[in-house]
Structure formats: structure tokens, C-alpha cells
Image: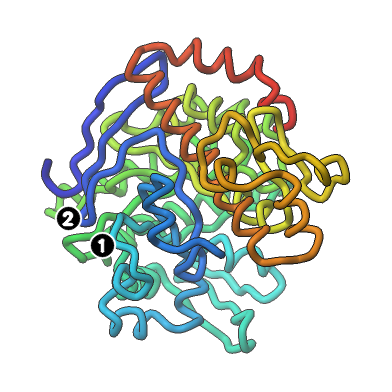
Amino acid sequence: MALFDCTTDATSGHARALTYETAHGCFHTPMFMPVGTRATVKGITPDQLHDLGAQVVLANTYHLAMRPGADVVAEAGGIHRFMNYDGPILTDSGGFQVFSLADTVTLDDDGVTFRSVYDGEKVRWTPEKNMEIQQLIGADIVMQLDQCAPYPATREFVQKAVDYSSAWAARCLAAHAKADQTLFGIVQGGMHLDLRLESVRRLLEAERVSTAAGGRAFGGFGIGGYSVGESHEVMFETLGEVARALPADRPRYLMGVGNPTTLVRAVAEGVDMFDCVLATRTGRMGTAFSSQGRMNMKNAKHKRDFGPLDAACTCPACTQYSRAYIRHLIVQGEMLGGILVTLHNLHFLLDLMRRARQAVLNDEYDVFLSEWLASPAALDY
């Protein structure tokens, strides 16, 4: 396969199994990406990520640009050498972090001005500057600068976010030049289907203009602006049609979603890639995913339970430690407790997507989806 080639290995209904080639190896979808915001998945080593079967790790442009600085990461040899991870890496643009600080943000057609959460310094990003930063960091996949509208928001606000994101997508395409890195465009539009489809059309038009002039195409597409406060049912009112409006020959990445049942349902709608801090953040707080639903490991009922965290799981936490021990660590605030539950939660989502892929390859995704939705694991999500 050539760099950034995408092969469709199988379909099952709308669900897809893809293989995508990057400069640091290929990955297979459906796929969940652990989040390493500051160039680390909290509490987890790169070797453990490989052992768990992680295919792509996500890092955050906003935080790395602020600390230690994109120039420092570049001087280290790029993000892969800096964090000692040799697999594919994706950086998000940092736009979500910028626009979550609404009271410090000034927005105009050319870009965005905001204050750093680290030292209060005023920072100016244009789409071109954002591409410069992401190229210095050096991930395999980078995301365009976009504006993510909150929920709820007025239609006028969401329309303006689509306008900014669409215009910035074209400018990111023109500015992006790193040959061993690909750029994904991002669909916005809130919960308005017509605005979502307009966003798709404008992304594809920006790509058409770019390629007609001898420039680049998008390597794939993010679907942003979901999981920002709306219910999952509201999200699914539009998600499938939006996903399937995107080109079938490239990955579709639902950004910031890590709820297990949502992943399984979204694959059925044609989504390929996911990321979220849910597995690691809740793991550090002592909440474990399981085949029987979520478990609060602080609960007293686990105090004398010497069985595994999840009898159906083969991760290191489940095969080597008991619920009683993990509860003890969590209750006492011991670092190892959060690490073990994080390991388990990541394994849970990575394995869930491996099984989803196999169901697509077997053309049995409808059965896989039905069985999941009928299982105890689906009830709490």
C-alpha cells in the first residue's frame, strides 16, 4: 500500500472494515484511539499501549503548543521520538480547547485570539499557523482548525461556526505541505442536519478546488461537534446520514466519543474511528467498564471479592489482580489502582472494536449489534 492509501476490506450493512496506511504503519477499523493529550496516555507506557493493541494514539495540539512548545517537540525529532511511541499518532487541532474557553476568545474571519490557560499569555492562531504548529509536532494525521459549537446554541451561531470551519478547511489544505502527514477535514453543524450536510458539501468543494489546482485532498474526515451536551439519541438523529454523506473511500472519525454502546451503534451507521478521554479519566477515578456494565470500584461490595475485575476480560488487570485488591488501591488513593483500571478500560474498548471489525469481516454486524444491545454491558451506557 502507498502512503495514506485506504482499502475497504469488507462491509456489513453500513458498517465498514478499512485498512489505512501511514508512515508509522497501517491501522484497521473500526478502531478506538487512546487519548494522550500531553504526549502521554496518563499512567500508561508506550510498551503497554502496544501490548493492549492500540493502533493510533491521539495527542492535543493546544496543550503541546503551550507546553513544551511545538519547537521543542520538533527539536526532539517529532512527536514519535519525543514520547517514544513508534505507531501512528493523530493530533487534533486544539480548536475544541480554544473554543471551550469562550470568555477568553476573540474570533474573526482570519482566525482566533485566546489566552493560554497556563500563563494567561495572548495567543493568535490562524489556520496557517495551526498547520505550522501541527507540522512541527509531526503526527501522522492532523486535523483542520475548526470552530466547535456548544449545545445548545442558536442556529445563527452554528451557521457561523460552519462558515468559519469551511473557510478554514480550505486554508488548512492550502497551507499543509508535510509529505509524510495527512490532513483530515472536519464536519460541523450542530444538531441541524441541513447545516451538517452543507458543511460536508463545502469540505468537498474545498477539496475539489485544491486538487484542481494541483494541491492536496483530505486524507479523511472528522465529524466534530457531537457529544457536547446533547443526548446520544439526539446525536443519532443525524449522525448516520452525515457519516454516509462523506466519501466512502476514506475514514470517518467521530471525534470525542468513547461510550461503548455509542461506539457500537456508530459503527453500524458507517463511522470508522473514535477517541475519548472517558476510558482513562473514569479509570483514574475508579470506574471500570465491564461485560456486566460499569462498576464503581469504591463500592464496599467489592471489599472481599477476590475474583477478577471482569471474568470475561483477558487484560493484565483482570488476569493478575482481584477486585478486592483494586478496590483497596482505589480507596487508599494509590496510583496503581488508577493505572490498573485504566489498563482495563482501554483494553475493553480496543477489544470491543476488534470484535466489531471481525463481525464486519464476517458480514454479521447486525447480529453483533443486536447481541451487544441485549447484553448487560449495554445497560449502563
Q: CA distance from mark 2 to mark 1?
A: 7 Å
Quadrant where the N terminus lies? top left
Q: Does the rendering let one see residue 43?
A: yes
Q: Is residue 8 above or below residue 110?
A: above
Q: Is residue 265 left or right of residue 232?
A: left
Report which residue position mark 2 lands on: 215
Please identify the residue farthest to the right as the structure is shown: 300
Q: Is residue 25 left or right of residue 202?
A: left
Q: Quadrant of residue 237?
A: top right
Q: Amino acid at mark 2?
A: Gly
Taking depth in this image into account, of 172 and 353 the one nearest to the observer is 353
Residue 370 place in picture, x, y as percent: 57, 13
Residue at 37% x, 23% y is 358
Report which residue position mark 1 lands on: 174
Residue 217 place in picture, x, y as percent: 23, 48
Taking depth in this image into account, of 256 and 204 the one nearest to the observer is 256
Residue at 19% x, 60% y is 180
The reply to whether callout 2 and callout 1 are in contact (CB within 8 Å) is yes
Q: Mark 2: give few (<14), some (14-19) or many (20+) Cα within 10 Å.
A: some
Q: Who comes first in sequence, dot 2 or dot 1?
A: 1
Q: Quadrant of residue 47?
A: bottom left
Please state the total of marks drawn on the protein image. 2
Taking depth in this image into account, of 71 and 160 the one nearest to the observer is 71
Q: Is residue 25 above or below residue 314?
A: below
Q: Is residue 55 left or right of residue 45?
A: left
Residue 205 place in picture, x, y as percent: 31, 43
Q: Amino acid at mark 1?
A: Ala
Q: Is residue 304 above or below residue 10?
A: below
Q: Quadrant of residue 96?
A: bottom right
Name the colouring of the figure.
Answer: rainbow
